[in-house]
Each structure stands twice: as structure tokens, then as C-alpha cells.
Amino acid sequence: MWSLIKKISLLLLIFLSFFSKNLSSEQKSIIETEEEIKKIYQSIVRIDSIVPSDARTANSLGTERNGNGVIIDENHILTIGYIVLESEKIDVTLFDGRVIPAKVAAHDYTTGFGIITPIIKTKLNHLPLGNSDNLSKEDFAFVLPFPNQGRGSAVKIVSRRPFTGWWEYYLENPIYTYPINYSWAGSPLINRQGEILGIGSLSVGETTPGIASLGNMFVPINSLKDILSDLKKHGKRTRDIKPYFGLSLEDSTGKVSILRVSKNGPAEKVGILPDDIISSINGKKISSLEDFYKTSWSFGGPGTEIKLDIERQNKNLSFKIKTGDRSDYYVKPKYF
């Protein structure tokens, strides 16, 4: 493990020496030696999870998943939630090679963050949370997966703009980085001061809008700060919960089309079908996924009744849906 860290450290230190010459004294890096990089790596873990075959996400995400995480305090490890969603078994590999069992402590469907905690008492070395609001598109940072998952890399912050996902997911201000690190899932984005700026979520083809630029999208760490105490105490957020329809959507044609309707979800229960087109929400016209999310969410959280106007095979139909809470639709973990 240490020989691999030494190789990664050399590359990162060469990069640091190249761009740090023009930094102000306030910007200077604390990551200047192999030992300092090794210390940071002591807070990065590998996560392996097993998901039951009857889980809702078993077909789309698989029943065996792995990725990365970063220790944020003496009891909690932050990752991207899809690695551990609906898991029944989680193993965490620490920097020193120990493998310990863990469980899901929290999942936030709005941001996508997941938090796990060891089942047995274990001393954990954590990294501090940075300030993701202070980033500009000229800043550099480091993507640091667990060493046997992939190589750490230096990246540039290239844009901050909204992201809309087909799975009822919208982020206002994620971090886009270039070039790509192929071990992004759950990997922390670290600044020169050794602070966490974000958690790796996806690979994207255009980190800069309109330009082919394969890179990564990170969920910014500041979106965790306001909900962290809730997640630790309740396992989920208790305010600003988004309503759930049970729809997979796309808007490539300038219309909001339904790709898939989740079994036993709110939309299926009222008769909405794949290939239906959503034209308006409570009478307000929409034409994009961003329109759909912002408009539907503005009427209230789970339990809100919302009218969708649908185009289906040249017919105009209306459906009233009582929205749900997404957390109620997934298999609950069964641990030791």
C-alpha cells in the first residue's frame, strides 16, 4: 500500500510544485511532503456493499457495489449514497488494510450523500470539511480514491452549474472537474489544505458546457453542512424533503417524457405510463426536467396532491397524484 502511495505522492507533488509558485500566502498548500499525503490517505476508505436481489435498485445498480468514502469524524464515513443504498452487508477497508463491518447511518436523496458507520468500535482519523462555496473555475484540487481502487489525480474546477438527473434528482450548484478520474464514486475532492470540498458522483461528457470535456461531477460539501446533524440523529433529513413521483424522465426533445414508471410508486398507482408526456403541473406549463423539479417541488413535500396534465397518443389526460417520500420505497437494511 505504501509503495503505491509513494508513486501517487510523487505525481501530486510534481503538480503542486508546478502551479503553487503563483499562489498567495493564504493559498499555500499544506500538502508538501509524502508524509502529509499519507496522512490524508489515512482518512480515505474503500467500501464494498452487498444488496439483496429483491432491492429496487438491484437491476439498475447491481447487487455487488464498491467505491470510496472519506472519514468525517470519529464515527462517520461520507460517501455517495448509491454505493450503499438498500445494502444488507457493508465492508470498509481502512488505510492499514483492516476490513471492518459497517452499516448505513443515513441517506439523503436530495443531495445523494450517504453516511455509514462502523458496527464495531474503531478509531477513525478524519478530514475537516472545507468551503465549497469559495471555489472558482480557476482553482485546482485533488481527487483521491482509495489506493487500490484507483490513482489519485490533480484536477481543475471548470464550472459550477445545475445538474438534472432522470431519476428525480436536481442539484443547483455541483462542482465539475477536468480531467476525469475513473474511480470517482464516493471519492473525496480535496483542496490544498487537506479539506473536503465534495464527493464524487458521476462522470460527465461536458464539464464545460458545449465542449467535449470528459470529467467528473462532485456533490459540494457545503450542501451537507446544514443537514449533517439531522442525518446523524435521524438517518435522513427532516426538512425540505422533496416529493416523490416514481418516474424516470428525459427532456431531449424539448418535452418532458416519461421513460419508466416505478412499480408501486405514486405515478403507477394512478395509471401514468411510460411514453406519456407531461405538459403541465397544476396548470403550469413545463418543457424541461429543471421545470418539472422546480415546479413540482414548489407545491410542498411528500403527501402533497399534484395534478399532472399528460399527452398520450394524441389525447390530453389529467391525473392527480399524492406524492410520496422516496425513503419509503426502498428495501430497509437488515444488519447484525
Image (cartoon, rainbow, N blue to C red):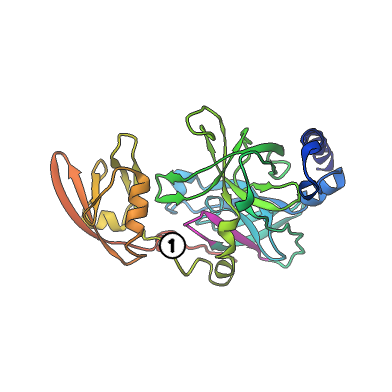
Q: Position of residue 248 (x, y in %)?
A: 35, 46
Decide which of 289, 265 is in the foreground and name it. Answer: 289
Instruction: Check residue 111 for magenta coloring.
Output: yes
**Segment colored magenta:** 107-119
Which residue position holds label 1? 327
Q: Position of residue 255 (x, y in %)?
A: 28, 39
Numbered disc total: 1
In this rendering, position of residue 307 left or right of residue 188: left
Q: Is residue 17 visible?
A: yes
Residue 179: image quadrant is top right
The residue depicted at 50 percent of the width and 44 percent of the height is: 161
Q: Amino acid at mark 1?
A: Ser
In this rendering, position of residue 213 left or right of residue 16: left
Quadrant, the N terminus: top right
The residue depicted at 59 percent of the width and 60 percent of the height is: 115
In the displayed image of the protein, which residue is found farthest to the bottom? Answer: 233
Decide which of 299, 89 is in the foreground and name it. Answer: 299
